[in-house]
Amino acid sequence: MNINCSDLNLNQAVKNEISQLLKLVEHNKDDLENIWQLMDMVWDEYGCNNKKLNWGNIDKFYSHPVWLLNGLFVEQHALSMQHRNAISDWIANKSSISKILDYGGGFGTLARLIADKNPSLLVDIYEPHPSDYSKQKISDYPQIRFISNIKKKYDVLVSTDVLEHVPDPLKTFEKMILAVKNDGCLIIANNFFPVIKCHLPQTFHLRYAFNVFAKLMGLVIVGPLEGSHATIFRKNNNKPVNWPVVRLLEKVSKGLFPLIEFLKPGLRPICRLVKHENTPS
């Protein structure tokens, strides 16, 4: 991980913290694995538990400089930047878009990419834990600001790798939908897998069912955003979410998840065979 924090405009305490973290990097490991390992170490240091949630400790975790280090890492990680460039290209080239909400876009990388590609666009970053360095990085962009409350409707909302961190992802997803104008779009990328300890296990069932819930909550699936790990959804009505139905199906999804995971290794060869049989020769 080629990050030299001495060159960055950071206070000395943060520099020291990041330097200590970088000393723990294992050079025989992939950089992505290293950043995940450092996050897990900080998670454990604060006594966090992803099954017994103590939000006082978890808030400290999300305010730790390891997230600043993660932002710096993302900006030098080819695949991460490919995803963000694909998303920012899609947004910057849509004439119908003028106001964007980056939901949970803490470091501001995506917002800055969008503003660089189309300076006429306004980007709000909804982020409960912005670092001073992140605020400094957007200081030259009058069209970007951090916000703590969502008070208006946007043409498009982007959320990358957020919902796996929250205890009630469907309720948070509803807040995202409410922040978008009718006929506006949501660009959502999720990682409902246990790659790091701050990914909450109660969200993992959504790796199979998320699109089903998106439809139930009034969205149309436009399709994958090419070149990224995100899916594009369109909001096509302002009807309230039918929460009794959603919660019932959420229980069903959570109940089926362990069975699907158990059966999945045996189902893979069957799926491959069916796909092969249906492929034109």
Image (cartoon, helix red, strand yellow):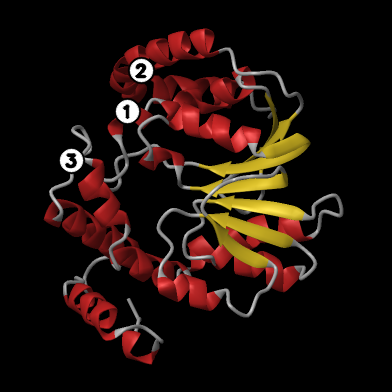
Amino acid on which the number 2 mark rests in the picture: Lys
Is label 3 in contact with label 1 (beta carbons under 8 Å)?
Answer: no
User: Is 237 rendered above or below residue 63?
Assistant: above
Q: Nearer the viewer, residue 18 or 122?
A: 122
Query: Between residues 279 and 5, which one lies in front from this camera angle?
Result: 5
First along the sequence among labels 1 and 2: 1
- Image point 28% across, 45% down: which residue? 198
Residue 270 percent coordinates (x, y)? 44, 19
Q: Give the camera-side residue of 160 and 207.
A: 160
Upstream in sequence: badge 3 or badge 1: 3
Q: Nearer the viewer, mark 2 or mark 3?
A: 3
Label 2 packing within 10 angstroms: few (<14), some (14-19), many (20+): some
The front one of 89 and 7 is 7
Q: Position of residue 247 (x, y in %)?
A: 45, 13
Q: Is residue 145 above or below residue 116?
A: above
Question: Gap between marks 1 and 2, in whole Å?
Answer: 8 Å
Can you tell which mark lies on residue 49? 3
Residue to which mark 2 is pinned:
254
In the displayed orientation, state which residue is furthest to the right.
95
**Residue identifier under label 1:** 202
Residue 266 lies, with reference to residue 36, above or below; the image says above
**The residue under label 1 is which amino acid type?**
Gln
> In this view of the protein, can residue 129 be seen by the observer?
yes
Q: Could you tell me if the residues under marks 1 and 2 are in contact, i.e. CB atoms within 8 Å?
A: yes
